[in-house]
Image (tube, rainbow, N blue to C red):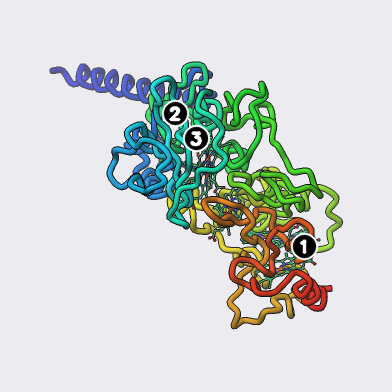
């Protein structure tokens, strides 16, 4: 071959390579910038696990995917199906719901898919058959599935995956998967993601006990009406002091507390009392900065206060704190006014009382007792026990359970007022 021909060919080859590569790069950039298509569909968590094996492994070990499982899988049923007071025919059970504090069952009674009567209380090791409200409505579809499955279609009752999957928090993933991860997928520290399920209320049409048609990134309130407490009045769900009495209500109390407002404290009406607002402030006051401590954020790069995903590991170890309280409350309770920390914990060091013991006491019932921590961080004074029967910060769990409310309130006033 003549040398000039070889050079020409080489040139042509490399031009093609560059053009193809440039085209691919442009296509990828365009794909990456495109919004998630409206018709993106749910594909199930196993499809995500193919590329995100670490997140998948952690998630698999947590309770989220275990919320709704078939009873014929080994180890799923923790209830005693041989108990004397067994409330239904075990042959009817198809799905087991929950396992930690309480387990319920869904199945077919021949006519309709239904919630079977009774619930197994894990702590007491017995069946509770009180409060059963009928067989004839398709209860799971109207009242349960929206929070216990992924990709529910309320018109058909079809869902893509039982339990809480990747797409419960990241939205439908078909576009992201089909573009080999270059196309977008929702990912945010916004507490509304968790608020979809860790709440109580009705869909906007009043038919369902969960948000219908909500996509991550939208406003939850456009799809859901929360049912908050009436202050001063006990109800089945709430104590009169606004603390959770029933399960799955962390979202509303969190919104009332200082953590949800911690960014607003800097952006609304801050008078400069602790110095100028700098990236260092955001490490404790904004979710994005707290979650990425090695990066410096400015005020216009952050959007959220201390949200659920700041304190909780969303993938592995849901039940373990991602950041402990003293990550931010590093000088004790008060970071800015640390002189106030002396004598803060009146019980003394030997008592080994933690911030959570006093500031997030167990007020919420799940299973046979109060096992859930209030998510409105603050003190429940003993006088609330007298007024509402609500557990106080002082008689929390085993602490001072032997003392009556009058004694406790006097001691409380003596120390803290
Ligand atoms: C074909 C491989 C592949 C599959 C399948 C896949 N991803 Fe990804 N994903 C990627 C790549 C590549 C990135 C970008 C690199 C990175 O940030 O890790 C990414 C990034 C992400 C991010 C970060 C996005 C951001 O804006 O910060 C999330 C969240 C995510 N994927 C979730 C999922 C979920 C949920 C699924 C299943 C519905 C899934 N992925 C399926 C490859 C994949
Ligand atoms: C309970 C909600 C929830 C579930 C379930 C969940 N994620 Fe996430 N994920 C989040 C949140 C919130 C973030 C943002 C965390 C942050 O910025 O620190 C995130 C971040 C990510 C990221 C970005 C990189 C990282 O690890 O921070 C990837 C990738 C990801 N998730 C993949 C997955 C996959 C795959 C699954 C399923 C196996 C899954 N997620 C399940 C809430 C969830
Ligand atoms: C699709 C509904 C849904 C979403 C979205 C959701 N959760 Fe959950 N979550 C549940 C259910 C149901 C359980 C109960 C699981 C069980 O006990 O088996 C649960 C349990 C938990 C637990 C207790 C787990 C344990 O091991 O003790 C924590 C903590 C938690 N969720 C935090 C979060 C956070 C943080 C988010 C948002 C990033 C979130 N959840 C989003 C439904 C959801
Ligand atoms: C609005 C969302 C939502 C709806 C609707 C909902 N749940 Fe749940 N459920 C949750 C969340 C979140 C938890 C975790 C509770 C917590 O830790 O506060 C939970 C916990 C449970 C538990 C205890 C699990 C355990 O491991 O201890 C059972 C049992 C349960 N739900 C059954 C049901 C049944 C049956 C229905 C329908 C009648 C239903 N739920 C409707 C969100 C919901
Ligand atoms: C990522 C940082 C961070 C973590 C982790 C954190 N806090 Fe806070 N906390 C703050 C900030 C910032 C404020 C001040 C909010 C404001 O008023 O702007 C605050 C306020 C408070 C308050 C007073 C506020 C109120 O009005 O509700 C209590 C009580 C509290 N935190 C307890 C806790 C407990 C208990 C833990 C651990 C379970 C914890 N905090 C973990 C940053 C944090
Ligand atoms: C190490 C974590 C941390 C850092 C850094 C931090 N804060 Fe705070 N901030 C807190 C905590 C904890 C509270 C609530 C308890 C208290 O009063 O100390 C709080 C409360 C506040 C409040 C509201 C309540 C009050 O006490 O007036 C404002 C305003 C505030 N901080 C501003 C700032 C500014 C401005 C910066 C940066 C110059 C900053 N913070 C840096 C942890 C932090
Ligand atoms: C023995 C119980 C107890 C323990 C343990 C405890 N606190 Fe407190 N804390 C209180 C009481 C009581 C108050 C005063 C509340 C009041 O005046 O209503 C308080 C007040 C506070 C405040 C100011 C509240 C506000 O509304 O501005 C913050 C912030 C705080 N504590 C954080 C913490 C943190 C963080 C820890 C763990 C390092 C902790 N506390 C440990 C009992 C406790
Ligand atoms: C300031 C930190 C903090 C924030 C913010 C926070 N949590 Fe928690 N959460 C905790 C602690 C501490 C526990 C008790 C777990 C333990 O230490 O055993 C807990 C427990 C839970 C549990 C298990 C049941 C229980 O009460 O023990 C659920 C479910 C939960 N949180 C959901 C949420 C949701 C949803 C949000 C946001 C709306 C949220 N959390 C925000 C600190 C936090």
Q: Mark 3 or mark 2: name the one nearer the start of the chain.
A: 3
Identify the image quadrant of the N terminus.
top left
Of marks 1 and 2, the one in the foreground:
1
Identified at 33% across, 38% down, the residue is: 71
Instruction: Indicate the quadrant of ligand 1 in the picture.
Output: top left
> Could you tell me how many numbered marks the image carries?
3
**Alpha carbon separation for disc pair 3 and 1:** 41 Å
Identified at 29% across, 40% down, the residue is: 73
Left or right, 393 with respect to 136, comes to: right
| Residue 327 quadrant | bottom right
* Mark 1 closeness class: few <14, some 14–19, many ≥20 residues within 10 Å: some
Q: Mark 1 or mark 2: name the one nearer the start of the chain.
A: 2
In the displayed orientation, state which residue is furthest to the front.
Answer: 84
Question: Residue 38 got which mark?
Answer: none
Label 3 near ligand 3 (CB < 8 Å): yes
* Residue tagged 3: 168
* Residue tagged 2: 173
Left or right, 175 with respect to 77, comes to: right
Q: Mark 3 or mark 1: name the one nearer the start of the chain.
A: 3
* Residue tagged 1: 386
In the displayed orientation, state which residue is furthest to the left.
Answer: 1
Residues at circles 3 and 1 in contact by the CB criterion of under 8 Å: no
Identify the image quadrant of the C terminus.
bottom right
Left or right, 145 with respect to 241, comes to: left
Look at the picture and state if 393 lies above or below 122: below
* Mark 2 closeness class: few <14, some 14–19, many ≥20 residues within 10 Å: many
């Amino acid at each position: 071959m003549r040398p000039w021909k070889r050079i020409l060919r080489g040139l042509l080859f490399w031009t093609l390579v560059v053009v193809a590569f440039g085209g691919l790069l442009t296509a990828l950039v365009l794909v990456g910038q495109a919004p998630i298509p409206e018709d993106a569909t749910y594909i199930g968590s196993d499809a995500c696990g193919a590329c995100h094996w670490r997140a998948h492994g952690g998630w698999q070990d947590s309770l989220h995917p275990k919320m709704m499982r078939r009873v014929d899988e080994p180890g799923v049923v923790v209830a005693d199906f041989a108990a004397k007071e067994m409330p239904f025919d075990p042959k009817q059970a198809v799905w087991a719901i929950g396992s930690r504090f309480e387990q319920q069952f869904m199945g077919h009674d021949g006519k309709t898919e239904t919630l079977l009567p009774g619930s197994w209380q894990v702590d007491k090791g017995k069946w509770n058959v009180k409060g059963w409200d009928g067989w004839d409505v398709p209860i799971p579809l109207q009242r349960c599935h929206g929070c216990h499955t992924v990709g529910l279609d309320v018109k058909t009752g079809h869902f893509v995956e039982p339990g809480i999957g990747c797409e419960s928090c990241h939205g439908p993933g078909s576009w992201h998967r089909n573009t080999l991860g270059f196309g977008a997928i929702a990912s945010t520290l916004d507490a509304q993601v968790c608020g979809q399920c860790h709440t109580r209320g009705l869909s906007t049409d009043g038919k369902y006990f969960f948000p219908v048609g909500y996509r991550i990134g939208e406003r939850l309130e456009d799809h859901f009406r929360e049912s908050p407490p009436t202050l001063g009045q006990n109800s089945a769900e709430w104590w009169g002091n606004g603390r959770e009495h029933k399960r799955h209500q962390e979202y509303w109390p969190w919104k009332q507390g200082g953590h949800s407002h911690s960014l607003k404290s800097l952006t609304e009406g801050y008078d400069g009392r602790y110095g100028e607002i700098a990236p260092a402030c955001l490490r404790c006051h904004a979710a994005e900065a707290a979650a990425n401590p090695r990066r410096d954020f400015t005020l216009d790069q952050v959007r959220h206060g201390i949200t659920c995903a700041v304190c909780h590991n969303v993938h592995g170890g849901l039940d373990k704190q991602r950041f402990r309280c003293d990550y931010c409350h590093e000088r004790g309770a008060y970071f800015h006014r640390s002189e106030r920390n002396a004598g803060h914990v009146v019980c003394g060091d030997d008592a080994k009382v933690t911030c959570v013991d006093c500031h997030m006491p167990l007020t919420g019932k799940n299973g046979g007792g109060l096992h859930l921590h209030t998510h409105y961080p603050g003190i429940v004074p003993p006088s609330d026990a007298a007024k509402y029967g609500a557990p106080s910060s002082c008689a929390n769990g085993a602490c001072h359970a032997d003392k009556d409310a009058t004694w406790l309130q006097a001691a409380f006033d003596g120390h803290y007022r």
